[in-house]
Amino acid sequence: MARAGVSLDDAVRERFRPTVMAHEQVLPALEVLADLLPGRGLQRGSVIATRGPAAMSIGLALMAGASAAGSWLGVVGLPSIGLSAVSELGIALERVFLVAAPPPQRWAETVAAVADGAELVLARVPAQLRASDMRRVQSRLSTRGTVLVLAGLDEQAGIQPDLVVGTAAPQWEGINDGQGRLLARQVQIEVGGRRAGRPLRRLLWLPASDGSISAVTTITASRPTSASGGGDLLEQAG
């Protein structure tokens, strides 16, 4: 019999929810990112903030390893995300579902519901999110073992993520004297936060010329771009 105040459906889901074993507490990450992350992967139930000019790209790159391994990804409130570029980063589109931007007062409820059906959630925080709403989301993440990536989270948002992945100093290849086609981008990545220990840095191709992610082994004379110039290509149609 369901407990008082708990519906029968909720009681059944809780009774049969799979137990996450100790060796499954970390979702896999791409090899190029694994040694920057505690436990070489994404800690279940954690909140990760991404910042800087490539916040969206690095957020999806962090999830690409788990997506390729079979995890579902729910994307909340990012209608302009470019799906072709997402696929090139290694995200399995057949295991992605998009949720329209909810009203700010229903953001926490929506993200919590998505966390019931996905091991990975990518979202953008609305302005003036209440601390109590974020605590409710984090409780659901912990219960379900879901990883939440908050793309472009402002430092002043009042949220304390477990990891902060910053991006800086983007440099594009393919532009010469104002002409040409953008082919590849170098980005400086820094991983820090309360669960990270000392900050770790790496220079990545994000994306490389084939759309994938790889470490930069040779520094090239590329054209730098400002953090505000053009935005992240993953937030274009396609």
Image (tube, rainbow, N blue to C red):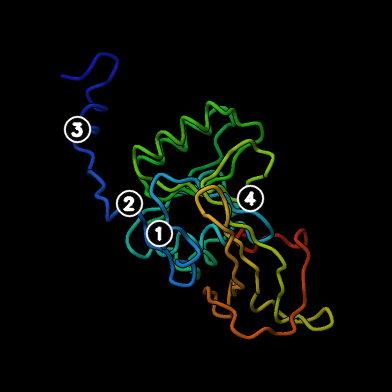
Q: Quadrant of residue 90?
A: bottom left
Q: Nearer the viewer, residue 160 or 54?
A: 160
Q: Nearer the viewer, residue 146 or 82?
A: 146
In the rendered view, tell whether residue 164 sits above or below residue 54: above
Compute the Cα span from label 1 to label 2.
9 Å
Label 3: element kind: helix
Amino acid under disc 2 = Gln
Horizontal and vertical percent position of residue 155? 67, 44
Disc ID at residue 39:
1
N-terminal of the pair, mark 1 or mark 4, is 1
Report which residue position mark 3 lands on.
15
Eye-nearest disc, 1 or 2? 1
In percent of width and height, residue 73 lies at 42, 52
- Image: 122 above or below 238: above
Can you identify the residue that label 4 sits on?
Answer: 152
**CB under 8 Å between discs 3 and 1:** no
Residue 202, percent from left and from top:
59, 70
- SS type, badge 1: helix
Cα distance in 3D space between marks 2 and 4: 25 Å
Q: Residues within 10 Å of mark 1 (few under 14, many from 20)?
A: some
Q: Quick one: label 2 or label 3, which is nearer the N terminus? A: 3
- Sequence-wise, which precedes: disc 3 or disc 1? 3
